[in-house]
Each structure stands twice: as C-alpha cells, then as structure tokens.
Amino acid sequence: MFVRKKKNSSGSTSIQIIKKVNGKSRVVETIGCSSDENEIEKLFLNGEKRLKELEPNLFDVVEKEDEKLQFISICNDQIIPIGDELYFGKLFDNIWDNDIFKSFYKTKEKTKLFKALVISRILFPGSKLYLADYLHYFKKENISDESIYRFVDTIYQDEIKYKIEQSVYKHSLKKLNNNLVVSFYDVTTLHFESESEDDLRKIGFSKEGKLNRPQIQLGLFTTLQGYPLSYEVFEGNKFEGNTLVNVLNKFQTRFNLKDKPIVVADRGMLNNNNIATLENGGYKYIIGARIKNISNDIKQEIVNLTFINDSVTHEIPITKTIKYKNNNDIQKSMDINQRLILSYSTQRAKKDKYLRDKALQRLQKRIETTPNISKSDLKLSPYAKFIDTQKSCNISFKLNQEKIVEDEKLDGIKGYVTNDKSLNHQNIIEHYQNLWHIEKAFRISKTDLQIRPIYHRLESRIKAHILISFVSYAIYREFEIKTHEIKKEYQVSNKIIRDLIKHTFAFNIDNKLIPTKLSKIQQDFYDALNS
C-alpha cells in the first residue's frame, strides 16, 4: 500500500491510500480533497500517518517509497553468537562439579576454558587452536594459542581425571535413577597422523584399517542408553582382551561399586584372566562365545541340537576348571559354572556360508597360482584351518572337505556365555545385542566429535584430548536423547542442528547481551533441552 495524490477534473487533488490487487490499483481509503497546496501537503502527511496505522510493518525498514533503505544502527561487532552457551552450556553445568579445579587452579577462568574446549569439540570439531580464533573474532575474548596448550598440558593428572570421570559417572547414574543394572564394555583404536612410535603410540591391529599408523586404544564403559561411565587409554599394540581387567579394577575402586552391574562385552574379551577377574570380583557377565573355537565335545552337542526357526534357543551348562594369572603373575586355577546360550538366525547362516565360500575360493586360487607357496603365506586367513598339507616330492596344499562340512553345521549359530542364573534366554540375548550403544558411542566420537586422527605428540596432550572428548561425548549424548523426538519431527541432520545452534545470536548493547528471538525450530530444540 501507498499514499497517492490524484488530480481531479475539477482541478482539486485527492489524497488516497492505494493497494495493488492483481496488478490493479484499488482505493483503500480517501483522506481528503483540496485545491490549496498547503492543505494538500497536510492531507498527504495525514495519509502517511494513516498508512502506518494500517501497515505498521511497512515502515520498519522503508520510511517512504522514494527514500533509501534505513539499516539498523548496530554494528556486526555487536552481534555475539550465544548458541554454544544457550544449548550446551547448561548441559555442561549439569554434569560439571564446580570443585573439580578448585585445588589445582586459583581462578575460575580454567573451568571456563575447559568448558569452551569441551563445547567447541561438539560445535567446531578439529584443531584446538581454532578455539582461540573463534573466541577472538566472534566472542570478543582474547586468549593466546600458548595459553590453551599450557592449560591442556596441565589437565591430565590422575586426580583431575578421577574427579571429572566421577562427575560424569554420577550424572550418568542419575539418569538411571541410581540403579546401574547393566554396563557395556568395548575397545576401539584411534590412529595418529604421525608415523613415529613411542611408549604409548604403537602400531598394532587397527580397527580402522590404518595398518601402518601408530595408534592408541580406548576402553570404554557405558550404560544401556549409551551414557559414558568410565574409560582408560592403552598402548596401541596391547591385545584388547587384556584391557578389561585394568578398566574394571579401576572402575570398581573409583566408584566403590556395591551393587555391581552385569558386564556385557564382545567375544574378544573371552579369556581366562578376564573370566577369573569377573568371577573373583563378584560380577555377573555376558560375553560373546566363539562357537567355532570351543571344545569338540561341546561342538558335538551343538550340532545335535535342533533349531526349527529363528526364535528357538538352547542352553548348555558348562562346568570347567580354568587356569589364569593373578595380579602378581602367579599361576592359579578356578572351578567355574557357566551357561552357554545358543540362538540361530537364517540370515546369519547365509552370511556365514557366503563369507566362507568367498574366502575358500581366494585360498584355492592362491594355492593353484602361487609357485612355492608356504603355509605361512596362508595362515593369515581365518579359514586356513581348512587347508591340509600333503607331503610327497614337493609340499602341496589342498582344502579339507570334511572340515568344511563340519564347519557348515555351525552356520547361523551364535553363542553367549554367562554366569548369571536368573536371566532368561531372551534377556541375555537382548543385553548382548545392546552392545550397539557403545559402538554408536565410538562412531559419534570418531565422526561428529572428530576425536581422530590425533595430531598431538606428547602423552599428556594425547590423554588430555581424550579426556576433553570424553566429557564432550557425555554432553552430546544427553543432547541427542533429549532432542530425539524433535529431530525426528523436523527430519534434520546433525550438521543442520549444529548450524542452527551456531546461528543463535545476541546484540551487545552497552555491554549488555540482548538475545534475538529464536526461530520455531530453534525454540523447539531449546524447550526440549529444558524440559
């Protein structure tokens, strides 16, 4: 709409408010009519006032049709991003115990810096040095790169790590109404960009396929919902099955566990030392069984079982004596009673057959096409157990069809070993299948939080990096759970969510922050976090 002066045939001028409808001008209101120039100008001003009453939003930016745009008189330097604090700051405060740094640092600034490092790992994963630039350019706060690294060098102390871990543990326990029934343990590897090794960074079996890169191992305990409980860092070449004892002992000591949770771990943890530690510590456990590597007697029992469909399960009681080494490296023995729960899956049976046939085809091709092949050339394959050695004039190899047929009888069968007498088969299987929560924790840490590759060289900085990421994951997991329904409703990616949070601003006017109004989606996420 606009105000128009219209010349009439009588010589007078009418002042009208006009609105364009489908390209045609329509009179909304006539303000008045006059032949006097002064009176016409007064009527025009009255028309503008009336137009403001009818369309107040029209004059927020444009005062008159023929005037230039009037920009708001706030400089870009006065626009401060507040999404990091608004969305993640409160989650950090809910976890953080204000006494953690009290005995180590004189000022509260260190807590503020640690908080910034943790939240930046969520919103701006990557170099810690970017945090200095971000604070300078966007928050108008000055901190040097050296200050960040000096602080990082002091974070990883046993007492600080213990207090931070305890704070995260208490928060996770609170989410379970202080009733930790089941805990999940797994190990992952984190590689470095550097090619040099030291006492911690070692080349070992990489779960990421980085075979020529030094790495460390991270052992993590989580709850059923994926909330973190405790963690430890190990050398890159340590056998993952030997990590459980270390983490479990510290886990039990630090948190003085009275009602001990059921420990769920994958089959890589099934060794005598781990079993002995769990049994002696009074823990119940569920561990994946290596069905095709167990004793022949039990194998024969399994083969004689009938699995009609995927819902049928069987149980085989196991009583045996295991030999293990205690903390003083002294050989000991123990009698244990376990339950071996067996389930069958048609889909798993197809996969087992497919993988074996594929591998055996490759082995057969190597035997036929590689001259002077030796057994060491074949032993890396898990299916090399099906190869027999023939000794005549020359040593040759061939596939043992009888062993292959015997192996086929176990296709599709998965086993679970437990010492818990109260759980039924379905509970045991469901608890084990929930290990995906900890696998998701590792996936989030590696992708969304970009915990690896690690660029640090000093051990203290490497461990500080893991500690910061541990707290970041605890906050991120809480954010994920609280906003799950909103995210599903809007069908937005994690990247869009982070961008929405980054683009939450306030105006700094006379050193007072005045937040801008949140968009509907921003408000919905904010409300979900505060519900």
Image (tube, helix red, strand yellow):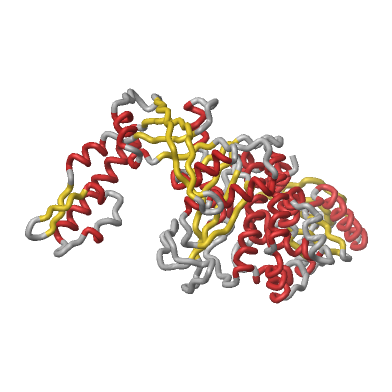
Q: Quadrant of the C terminus?
A: top right
Residue under the image location 30 percent in, 50 percent down:
382
Say which of 34 and 266 sits in front.
266
Say which of 69 and 349 sits in front.
349
The tally of labels here is: 0
Say which of 103 and 316 sits in front.
316
Residue 102 in percent (x, y) is at: 82, 60
Does 14 appear above or below 156?
A: above
Residue under the image location 47 percent in, 50 percent down:
241
Q: Is residue 226 left or right of residue 258?
A: left
Q: Is residue 241 left or right of residue 528?
A: left
Residue under the image location 64 percent in, 59 percent down:
467
Residue 349 appearing in the image: yes
Residue 286 in percent (x, y) is at: 50, 37
Tell me which corner region of the image, top left, top right, bottom left or bottom right, holds residue 365: bottom left
Residue under the image location 52 percent in, 58 percent down:
217
Residue 508 in percent (x, y) is at: 83, 64
Tell me which corner region of the image, top left, top right, bottom left or bottom right, holds residue 397: bottom left
